Image (cartoon, grey):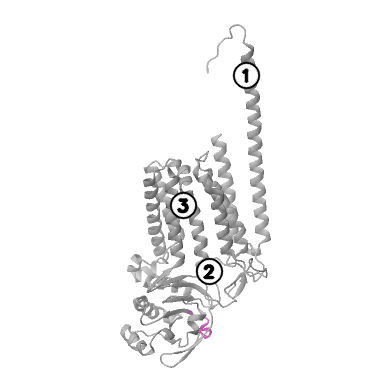
């Protein structure tokens, strides 16, 4: 910035211009300050309202699922069922409470079901002694019962295969695609579900290990 | 709820389909307006492609690291195309790092780029809401309110939070659609306005959810995160406008 010595009289229109500029700038400054203040006040009010809503919408007891209602969704109690297995034994899901259960709903004609069976078998063999159970529910209402045993023999499957002859389990679990798998914790609550497949062995192992690590 | 769409022998996962559709539409919309923010369509596409790729790889690697024992027993699982074996935090971190590296390398400016990507984010919020409707996840808590403020879902009458989410995303889209045509002054305000609207609407909707992570006193963790995000957005907006003046 350079200072120059004033020379002679300052024209009156220049003085007026300077006065105008100062006034406008002051006015603008005031407007800017008030806009800034207004915005900050609005933000503060909104944040306080947000805090109020957080407090007001705090969940009362029983507001969330808490695993009480049976529904085929993560966080809910797994819908109970009793079925007869391929070798004639009876199996009830709720009797398995305290163990980690994989309910895999499948059919012999379904390619991804075939693809994931070796992984399920390997995982079952690895963790069955630690409290892991597989219920490979065959959607018999959409399958041929005669094809099941050859399928089991082909893959050397050792886990129980309950038969859903009337499709009740398929309906209760809202199965719209095969395979569908539900990972059920020791408390009987669905922790994870997978629609479609095939599942990778690492994926199965990761989920089962996590569920087995939970305290009964 | 329609988690799977069966077309002949094909079983399409509807939530994934909705997200892909939103990504495609969002990119198309962002492509039309990105030049207003000083970003070419080619640069926009390469940025999004690299970030998605890095996020996918990061998410799978983090998942494998978190479940090292399972992957050591079955290492081929690392290359599985199954989208369920992804870690969201790992994906976010890898995506963010790749975006920052790209930004430095190609001298992409931070705020104008976020403004240019806002149409994509807007469509993605619509896609996420639709995916929640399709899968039945992100459900509301039980209520005795009459229809349309309650829907029968998972064995009870519940707040239709997925539909609230869709409504909020549509309103945000409607509010900001016209602003997409302008170059926001200062840069970054378009993105921050969008973010504030999303955080604010989520703060409200999360209070009606039935799957919240509860803290002592019944407070919902996700709501507190949304509130903190909103506070950070307001702070950034203030700084941005002040710096511009």
Q: Is residue A97 magenta?
A: yes
- Tell me whether marks 2 and 3 sit on the same chain: yes
Q: Which residue is drawn at 32% across and 88% down?
A: A150
Characterize the local packing of mark 1: few (<14), some (14-19) or many (20 or more) Cα atoms within 10 angstroms. Answer: few
What percent of the width, then of the height, locates residue B228? 58, 52
Mark 3 lies on residue = B120
- Tell me whether marks 2 and 1 sit on the same chain: no
Q: Distance between the residues labelled 2 and 1?
A: 67 Å
Characterize the local packing of mark 3: few (<14), some (14-19) or many (20 or more) Cα atoms within 10 angstroms. Answer: many
Q: Earlier in the sequence, mark 2 or mark 3?
A: 3
Image quadrant of residue B168? bottom right
What percent of the width, then of the height, locates residue A119? 36, 76
Tag 2's secondary structure? loop
Quadrant including the C terminus of chain B: top right
Characterize the local packing of mark 2: few (<14), some (14-19) or many (20 or more) Cα atoms within 10 angstroms. Answer: some
Mark 1 lies on residue = A18
What percent of the width, then of the height, locates residue A185? 51, 76
Q: Residue furthest bottom?
A: A88
Along the line of sight, the residue nearer the viewer: B217 or A115: A115
* Chain letter, disc 1 residue: A
The disc label shown at residue B169, or none: none
Q: Distance between the residues labelled 1 and 3?
A: 49 Å
- Tell me whether marks 1 and 3 sit on the same chain: no
The span picked out in magenta is A93-100
> Does A128 sit left or right of B210 as displayed?
left
Q: Is residue A92 magenta?
A: no
B223 to A111, vertically: above or below = above
Mark 2 lies on residue = B136
């Amino acid at each position: 910035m350079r200072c120059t010595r004033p020379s002679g009289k300052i024209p009156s229109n220049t003085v007026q211009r300077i006065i105008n500029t100062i006034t406008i700038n002051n006015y603008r400054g005031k407007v800017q300050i008030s806009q800034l203040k207004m915005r900050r006040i609005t933000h503060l009010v909104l944040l306080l309202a947000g805090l109020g809503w957080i407090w007001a919408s705090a969940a009362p007891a029983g507001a969330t699922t808490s695993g009480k209602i049976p529904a085929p969704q993560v966080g809910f109690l797994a819908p109970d069922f009793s079925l007869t297995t391929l070798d004639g034994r009876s199996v009830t899901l709720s009797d398995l409470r305290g163990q980690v259960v994989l309910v895999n709903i499948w059919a012999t004609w379904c390619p991804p079901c075939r693809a994931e069976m070796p992984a399920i078998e390997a995982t079952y063999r690895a963790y069955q002694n630690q409290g892991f159970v597989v219920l490979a529910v065959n959607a018999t209402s959409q399958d041929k019962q005669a094809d099941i045993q050859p399928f089991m023999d082909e893959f050397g499957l050792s886990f129980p295969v309950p038969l859903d002859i009337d499709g009740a389990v398929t309906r209760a679990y809202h199965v719209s695609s095969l395979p569908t798998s539900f990972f059920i914790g020791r408390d009987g609550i669905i922790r994870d579900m997978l629609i479609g497949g095939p599942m990778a062995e690492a994926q199965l192992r990761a989920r089962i290990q996590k569920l087995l690590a939970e305290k009964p | 709820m329609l988690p799977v769409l069966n077309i002949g022998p094909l079983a399409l996962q509807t939530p994934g389909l909705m997200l892909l559709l939103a990504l495609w539409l969002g990119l198309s919309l962002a492509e039309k307006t990105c030049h207003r923010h000083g970003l070419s369509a080619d640069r926009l596409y390469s940025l999004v492609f690299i970030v998605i790729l890095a996020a996918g790889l990061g998410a799978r690697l983090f998942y494998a690291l978190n479940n090292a024992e399972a992957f050591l027993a079955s290492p081929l699982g690392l290359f599985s195309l199954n989208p369920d074996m992804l870690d969201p935090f790992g994906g976010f971190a890898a995506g963010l790092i790749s975006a920052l590296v790209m930004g430095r390398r190609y001298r992409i400016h931070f705020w104008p780029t976020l403004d240019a990507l806002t149409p994509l984010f807007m469509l993605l919020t619509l896609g996420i809401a639709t995916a929640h409707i399709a899968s039945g996840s992100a459900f509301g808590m039980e209520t005795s309110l009459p229809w349309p403020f309650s829907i029968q879902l998972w064995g009870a009458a519940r707040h239709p939070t997925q539909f609230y989410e869709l409504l909020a995303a549509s309103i945000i889209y409607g509010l900001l659609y016209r602003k997409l045509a302008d170059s926001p002054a200062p840069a970054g305000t378009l993105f921050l306005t969008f973010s504030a609207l999303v955080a604010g609407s989520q703060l409200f909707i999360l209070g009606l959810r039935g799957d919240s992570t509860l803290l002592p006193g019944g407070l919902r963790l996700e709501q507190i995160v949304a509130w903190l995000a909103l506070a950070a957005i307001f702070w950034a907006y203030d700084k941005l406008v002040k710096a511009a003046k």
